[in-house]
Image: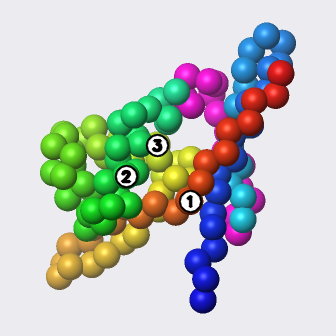
Amino acid sequence: MAKKTKSLEITIKNEGGKFNPFFKKTSIDKKSYDFEGISTMRKLLSNEKARILNVIKEKNPKSIYDLSKILDRDFKSVSEDIKLLEKFGFIDLLKEKTGKRERLKPVVIIDSLNIQIKL
């Protein structure tokens, strides 16, 4: 069976001299994501977040801890970045049990990102 392409759409509207972005997942889930402002989008679309997404996709880490080791970054910082990426629909965290412990495995769930700016 062919894998469905999931894309994330960001629309930025100029309303009263202020850019107001909102997110929408297109394909299976039509959920919209609220945004405090354009500054949140800047944090979300940083080079470090792109690096995290690339490592998740290419290296397939088993947990957030594994991801932080691969990235050579502090676990807390990586965890905060992961929560933001999950909140806006870039990744899912899959629960996996190993013995008595449960770990969260990050998985990229979108294939494309579309940004549209309406003036």
The x, y position of residue 113, in whole percent, is 61, 48
Label 2: which secondary element: helix
Q: Residue at x 63, y 74 (%)?
A: 4
Q: Which amino acid lies under the numbered mark 3 shown in the image of this protein?
A: Leu
Q: What secondary structure is marked by label 1?
A: loop
- State yes or no: residue 34 in magenta: yes
Left/right placement of residue 47 relative to residue 11 reads left
Which quadrant would residue 107 be assigned to in this image? bottom left
What is the three-letter code of the residue carrying label 2? Asn
Task: Characterize the local packing of mark 1: few (<14), some (14-19) or many (20 or more) Cα atoms within 10 angstroms.
Answer: few
Residue of label 3: 84
Which label is found at residue 54? 2
The residue where tag 1 is placed is 111
Nearest the eye: 104 or 108: 108
Mark 1 vs mark 2, CA separation in Å: 12 Å
> Left or right of 112: which side holds 80?
left
Q: Is residue 11 visible?
A: yes
Q: Quadrant of residue 41?
A: top right
Q: Which residue type carries mark 1? A: Asp
Cα separation between marks 2 and 3:
16 Å
Instruction: State yes or no: residue 30 in magenta.
Output: yes
Q: Position of residue 61 (x, y in %)?
A: 26, 63
Mark 3 vs mark 1: give the one in front. 1
Q: Which residues are magenta?
A: 28-41
